[in-house]
Amino acid sequence: MSASPVRTGLDCLPELRDLLRGCRVGLIANPSSVTATFRHAREVVAALPGVTLAALFAPEHGFEAVEQDLVEIPDAGGRIPVHSLYGPVRRPTAAMLERLDALVFDIQDIGSRYYTYIWTMAHAMEACAATGRRIVVLDRPNPIGGRAVEGNIIRADHRSFVGLYPLPNRHGMTAGEIAGLLNRHHRIGADLVVVGCEGWRREAWLDEAGLPFLPPSPNMATLDTAAVYPGGCLIEGTNLSEGRGTTRPFEITGAPWIESGRLADALNAEKLPGVHFRPVSFRPTFHKHAGEECGGVMQHVTDRSAYLPYRSGIALIAHIRRLWPEPFRWRDPPYEYEFERLPIDILSGSPALREGVEAGQGVPELAEAANEGRSAFDPVRERYLLYR
């Protein structure tokens, strides 16, 4: 196998021989935590000279990433214990850290604030700051590129585990850059070391970086899925199927009562950049509308440099609610440990999107409102970018 032109933080870690020497280390990882030659972080960390891999930590979906969304992960015993960070606790406890000197975080993020792994990282940073331990973030490219930014900033009273700190829906950052922003701008104050990537250009998608896309969660199977996710995840806040239980989650949206052709025509009339909506029929094997034949659309990204996934997600919801107002519903709580606020509100970061859709606003108006707070965020983001 030829070497990738880009090296991840995990690829670079063995060269930093003194970074963790003499430490008992806990590793937060999953199956996406591999080198360019598919060597897992567990093996890499355990082989570091003078390092003891003493604990593993499982984020949402589990250390092996086999559980579906919203399924709590149990602790597991064994020679190296596995502590759950998606269950009764989502932050490493003092007891979990008692015999550790440092934590290492290495999971592939996919570039959208709803994806919970960066918030597991944030909680780990908070725990390390509180207990005086080092946290090392092994950086990886943003798989959908690091230039495009889209969407609004979370309102302070709508923070949740799909948005603990104010980021836009598509943030255009890497996990390491987000760690630096949280640590300094939001004053977490951890002993943070980011081991950066080598050779990555911000505009490069993961396939252009020459790195493999390993599914970081059960419904994030391909780079095509990651491309649509910053808007496709909004569908979770409705009674529409977001395509879970099919082979194309988040790329497909629909429900039993939708007329596919009518919806596709309405969406394509919007002339949204870089995407075509194709009418489809599908039958989910699990999750919403399991076993029922659904009508809907599949998003085909025709120009990913022009494509606006959040605007496309807004358009899906707005047109389906306009065309089928009676059967359409917002999903009820609970959702991601939130028991009172509507899931669509915590996903979108405020009630504004829901209220705009209910008021019958058009897609341009809804998308314009979705830039709220960006003018203040953009210069902050710029200060913490590690790659050009």
Image: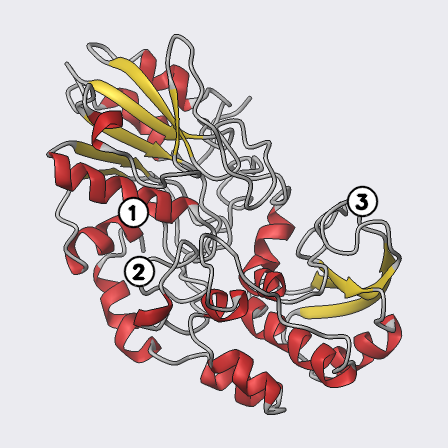
> What residue appears at the point 45 percent right and 63 percent down from the top-left corner?
170
- State the residue at coordinates (29%, 39%): 196
Q: Position of residue 162 (x, y in %)?
A: 43, 56
Q: Report which residue position mark 1 lands on.
A: 122
Residue positioned 26% across, 77% down in the render: 376
The answer to which image quadrant residue 272 occupies is: bottom right
Instruction: Pick whichever, 102 or 50, lies toward us.
Output: 102
Residue 213 lies, with reference to residue 270, above or below; the image says above
Disc 1, SS: helix
Q: Residues within 10 Å of mark 2 (few under 14, many from 20)?
A: many
Q: Tag 3 or tag 1, which sits nearer the N-term?
A: 1
Can residue 191 be seen here? The reply is no
What is the number of the mark on residue 58? none
- Residue 165 disc label: 2
Give the residue type at disc 3: Thr
Instruction: Residue 83: give x, y in percent of width and height.
Output: 38, 26
The N terminus - image quarter: top right
Task: Classify 10 Å Cα crowding around label 1: few (below 14), some (14-19), many (20 and above).
Answer: many
Label 3 element class: loop
**Residue located beneath label 3 in the image:** 285
Question: Marks 1 and 3, how far apart in space?
Answer: 34 Å
- What amino acid is found at the position of numbered circle 2 in the picture? Tyr
Q: On the rendered structure, is 385 left or right of 41? A: left
Front of the two marks 1 and 3: 3
Residues 21 and 252: in front is 252
